């Protein structure tokens, strides 16, 4: 198979423009890596004008963090690098947008800690244990459904189905609403991609419509569970009370949007990129197949590092500070580029290579250290481990037959479609 996304050999001339989706972010992955490598060496904390958006006036610009040490320092000092002014967009989004998309990742303490305490009541050890069992049975069913065909779109038939079902089942969303949740989450994550939002002049309205749809779904479900609780997480959340405080309907809806979006994209895109990487690196597939139990933990971490499904998160300076020898002022914005930090040669040997036995692997694919480290990291690791174990044992020759169709985005390193083939009926 010929692919534009190999793991070595990228070049970049000049200063890459991190704000230009249609040059930098749609370039081959190896060229993206080369562009960030050039910045790390010559200008590790560069300043950029903000991306041009049709629905918002231009903002004041932002600094880009490209080195792991700088990103880690910013993550560990949330009192300096705050999230409450926006975290998922370099641009300052309007208040009505933040109503839907401003859950815990766009909060600072004490509000962040309050919401996290209440939400934690919905994730007891027993409930999480039951959820882990569901992951195994769901992964097996997914392979059952495709195994006789010998080919499929790995994104829609395999990698997207697992986290979607797990999150929806966990919250008590009925199966009849799966497609609705899938479609709305695609709009939220892929608003800049014409496959999901064809009208480029109507992106903000499409985002708000998607957010409103998911919000209404969860508010309706929350009302039902408040009156007739079951054993799902929604029932636990609407009835959880700490120091006399409960989640408001708006907070429940916002958390649900965060869960279906964040709980979907990391697993979905990591599995898709992992299948591409195993196709591109047959020697790594052989290593993994030779010791599935022993290699799976490090292989999953390596897929997350290499793919870095969430490309960046934003922080805003609450006070003046110095980072990477760059003086920063209160009010300045920084974009923490996890994708770049996960290829920092100071911390990763041969960082562009895919090595299923890489150790140590101090990646920040689930966010940097601090209060905003991904709450669902353990579940995402479990989902990926189980899915790849199922695939490697039952369809060990599964391979991509074309390059991945990538999402047009500077926020999510997404794969929209990935055709794969394998021996019909699986391993004999």
Image (tube, grey):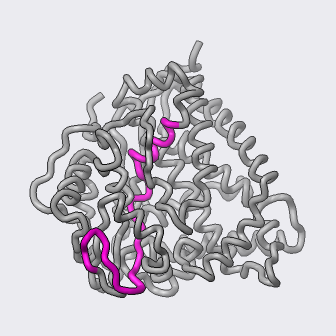
Q: Is residue 194 visible?
A: no
Q: Residue at x 40, y 72 (%)?
A: 314
**Quarter of the picture holding the N terminus:** top left
Q: Residue at x 59, y 76 (%)?
A: 212
Q: Residue at x 58, y 38 (%)?
A: 385
Magenta residues (range): 298-327
**Drawn side of residue 401 relative to residue 27, left or right:** right
From the top left corner, tell me how far across and down residue 236 is, in percent: 81, 66
**Quarter of the picture holding the C terminus:** top right
Residue 103 versus residue 151: which sits nearer the camera?
103
Q: Residue furthest left?
A: 14
Q: Residue furthest right?
A: 228
Number of disc labels = 0
**Drawn side of residue 420 relative to residue 6, left or right:** right
From the top left corner, tell me how far across and down residue 373 is, in percent: 54, 62
Snapshot quadrant of residue 92: bottom left
Q: Residue at x 55, y 79 (%)?
A: 108
Residue 332 versus residue 389: which sits nearer the camera?
332
Residue 375 versus residue 225: which sits nearer the camera?
375
Q: Is residue 381 magenta?
A: no
From the top left corner, tell me how far across and down residue 164 is, in percent: 62, 52
Snapshot quadrant of residue 46: bottom left
Q: Is residue 311 magenta?
A: yes
Residue 46 versus residue 289: which sits nearer the camera?
46
Look at the picture and state if 299 lies above or below 205. Answer: above
Q: Is residue 39 visible?
A: yes
């Amino acid at each position: 198979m010929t692919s534009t996304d190999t793991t070595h050999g990228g070049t970049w001339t000049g200063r890459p423009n991190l704000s230009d989706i249609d040059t930098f972010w749609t370039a081959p992955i190896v060229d993206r890596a080369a562009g960030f490598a050039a910045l790390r060496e010559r200008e590790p904390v560069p300043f950029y004008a903000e991306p041009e958006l049709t629905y918002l006036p231009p903002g004041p610009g932002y600094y880009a963090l490209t080195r792991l040490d700088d990103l880690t320092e910013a993550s560990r000092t949330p009192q300096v690098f705050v999230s409450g002014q926006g975290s998922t967009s370099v641009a300052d989004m309007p208040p009505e947008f933040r109503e839907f998309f401003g859950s815990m990742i766009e909060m600072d303490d004490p509000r962040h800690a309050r919401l996290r305490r209440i939400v934690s009541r919905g994730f007891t050890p027993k409930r999480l244990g039951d959820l882990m069992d569901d992951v195994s049975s769901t992964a097996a069913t997914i392979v059952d459904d495709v195994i006789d065909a010998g080919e499929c779109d790995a994104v829609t038939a395999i990698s997207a189905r697992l986290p979607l079902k797990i999150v929806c089942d966990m919250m008590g969303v009925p199966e009849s609403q799966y497609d609705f949740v899938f479609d709305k989450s695609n709009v939220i994550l892929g608003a800049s991609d014409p496959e999901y939002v064809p009208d480029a002049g109507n992106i903000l309205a499409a985002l708000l419509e998607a957010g409103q749809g998911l919000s209404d779904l969860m508010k309706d479900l929350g009302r039902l569970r408040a009156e007739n609780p079951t054993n799902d997480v929604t029932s636990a959340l609407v009835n959880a009370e700490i120091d006399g405080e409960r989640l408001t309907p708006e907070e429940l809806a916002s958390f649900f949007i965060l869960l279906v979006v964040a709980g979907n994209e990391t697993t979905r895109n990591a599995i898709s990129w992992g299948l591409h990487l195993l196709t591109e690196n047959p020697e790594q597939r052989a290593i993994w197949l030779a010791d599935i139990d022993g290699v799976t933990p490090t292989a999953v971490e390596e897929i997350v590092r290499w793919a870095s499904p969430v490309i960046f998160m934003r922080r805003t300076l609450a006070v003046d500070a110095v980072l990477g020898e760059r003086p920063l002022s209160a009010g300045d914005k920084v974009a923490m580029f996890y994708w770049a930090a996960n290829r920092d040669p100071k911390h990763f040997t041969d960082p562009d290579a895919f090595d299923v036995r890489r150790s140590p692997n101090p990646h920040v694919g689930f966010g940097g250290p601090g209060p905003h480290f991904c709450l669902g990291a353990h579940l995402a690791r479990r989902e990926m481990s189980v899915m790849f174990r199922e695939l490697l044992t039952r369809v060990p020759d599964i391979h991509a037959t074309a390059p991945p169709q990538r999402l047009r985005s500077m926020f999510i390193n997404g794969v929209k479609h990935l055709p794969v083939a394998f021996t019909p009926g699986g391993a004999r």
